[in-house]
Image (cartoon, rainbow, N blue to C red):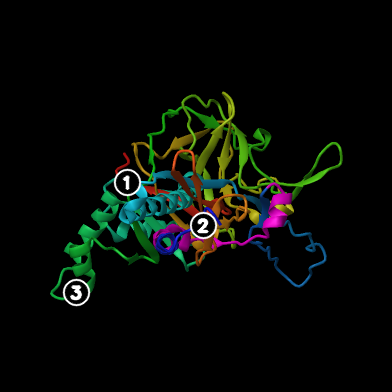
Amino acid sequence: MPNGFSKEEVVAFDQLLEGFQDALVMSKNVAIYRTDQTMMERTNDTIWRPQPYISVSYDGADATSNFNDYTQLSVPASITTQKHVPWIFTAKELRDALQENRISNAAEQKLASDINRSVINSASLLGSVFVKRSAAATGLDDVAQIEAAFNEIGVQFEDRKLVLSTRDYNGMASDLAKNTRSFGDPISNMALRKAYVGEVSSFETFKADYLTRKAAAAGGGSITISTADAGLNYYIPKATSTASTGEVSNVDNRYQTVTVSSTTNVAAGDAFTIANVFGVHLITKENTGQLKTFRVVSVTNSTTMVITPPIISNQVANVASAQYQNCTVTSKSGTAAITWLNTVAGFMNPFWQKDAIEILPGRLAVPNDAGAATMRATTDNGVEVVMQKQFDINTQKTKFRVDTLYGVVNKQPEMSGIIMFSQS
C-alpha cells in the first residue's frame, strides 16, 4: 500500500497506545459499558441505561394492598465525543524519528487528558452531593464529611473516588506529614517526600492539575421556592411518558424543572439547599437531619430552572415516589428560602462511587483501503485509538491523525458530588 506504515511508525504507535493507556487514570475509576456499535448507529448513538431499583417494605402479615408495580428508572447514555489530534510532516522533517515520537507522545497526552476531563466534568457539573468547607483542605476531617454525606443516604461503601486540585491535595498531604510523623512511618514519609495522600476515610484520592473552577453563586439570598403541595415543585418519578400521538418514550428522572421567585444571576453548577427540605436515606427513608443539597443544571427563564436531583419528597403519596424518595419536607411553605452553598470562587473537587459514572467506548469504522493507511488498537478498558497516515505527492507532506470516540454518562447524580474549600 502506497501509504503503508513503516516499521518505526508501528513501533511508535505501540508506544503511543501504551502511554495513552497508562494516562487514562480517571477512566480506570469509573464503570465501562461496551455497546454493539451497529445498534448504536441505528439508535443515534444513544442507549438507555437502568438505574438501581429501590424496594419498599411494609409492616405485618397482610400484603393484600401492597402489591404494586415497580417503576424502573433509566438514563440516556450517548457516545457523543470524538477527539482527534492531526499533524503534518514534510519529507525533510520525517528524517528525524525523534521528532515524530515527540508529537505522537503529545497526541497521546492530549487525548488521555480529554477523556479524563470528561469524567471529571461529569462528576463536577452533575454531582448533587455538595460538601462545603469553611477552611483550606487539611485532611481526614474533610474527607470524613464526604464519607458521612454518602453513608447517610446509603451510597455503596466500596469503590469511592475523590479527585483534588493540586493545592487542596497538597494541603491534605501536609497534614498527614505533620500529624502522622514518626521515624520510618510509611504514611508520613510518602506524604512528606511525594505529597502522596492515598486512601482516606474510605475514599481513594487522586491529584489533578485540570479541575474546573466555579464562580461564587450570585443569585442572592432573597430567592424562594414553594414547598407547599399547591406549589407543585415536588417530583413523581416515572419510567415512560406518552405523547398526544400515543408514542411512548423513556423519561430521564435525573432532572426536574422547578419554579422559583427569581433566577436572576443564577448560573449552572450553583449548589443550594431549601429550608426544611432534608435528605433521607435512599433505602430506609429515614431523615438524615441534613438539608438536601441540589445543583442547578440550567436556567430556563426568569422564574424556572432545571435542577438535579429532583425533589422526590412523597409529600403527595405515590407508589413511585415512595420507592425513590430522596428527601422530606418537615415544614411546608409557599416561600421556602434557598441558600446558596458555593459562596466563594474555587475548584470543584469531584467525588463519586464507581458505578455512578460510565464510559461508553465507541468505534470508528475507518476504511483500510481508501488511500490512507490505518492502524487501530483497543485499551484494556475498551477505548479504541485509531491512527491514520496519508502522503500528498504534490507537496511531499504526510498527514497523520489520531482519533478516539467515546461517551461519558453520570447515571446517578446522588452518588457523586463536589467538595469546595475556603467557603465563607
The residue furthest left is 183
Residue 41 sits inside the magenta stretch? yes
Q: Which residues are magenta?
A: 19-44
Q: Distance between the Cα atoms at labels 1 and 2? A: 53 Å
Residue at left offset 79%, top offset 70%: 62
Q: Position of residue 238 (x, y in %)?
A: 72, 49
Residue 121 sits inside the magenta stretch? no
Foreground mark, 1 or 3? Answer: 3
Element under disc 2 = loop
The count of marks equals 3
Residue at left offset 59%, top offset 33%: 226
Element under disc 1 = loop
In-front residue for pair 404/144: 404
The residue pinned by badge 3 equals 185
Q: Label 1 neighbourhood size at 10 Å, few (<14), some (14-19), many (20+)?
A: many
| N-term-proximal mark, 1 vs 3 | 3
| N-term-proximal mark, 1 vs 2 | 2
The residue pinned by badge 2 equals 4
Residue at left offset 59%, top offset 55%: 362
The residue pinned by badge 1 equals 421
Q: Position of residue 23 (x, y in %)?
A: 39, 59
The residue furthest bottom is 184
The amino acid at mark 2 is Gly
Residue 52: give its label. none
In-front residue for pair 353/409: 409
Compared with residue 412, is residue 18 higher up or lower down, i.e. above or below?
below
Q: Quadrant of the C terminus?
A: top left
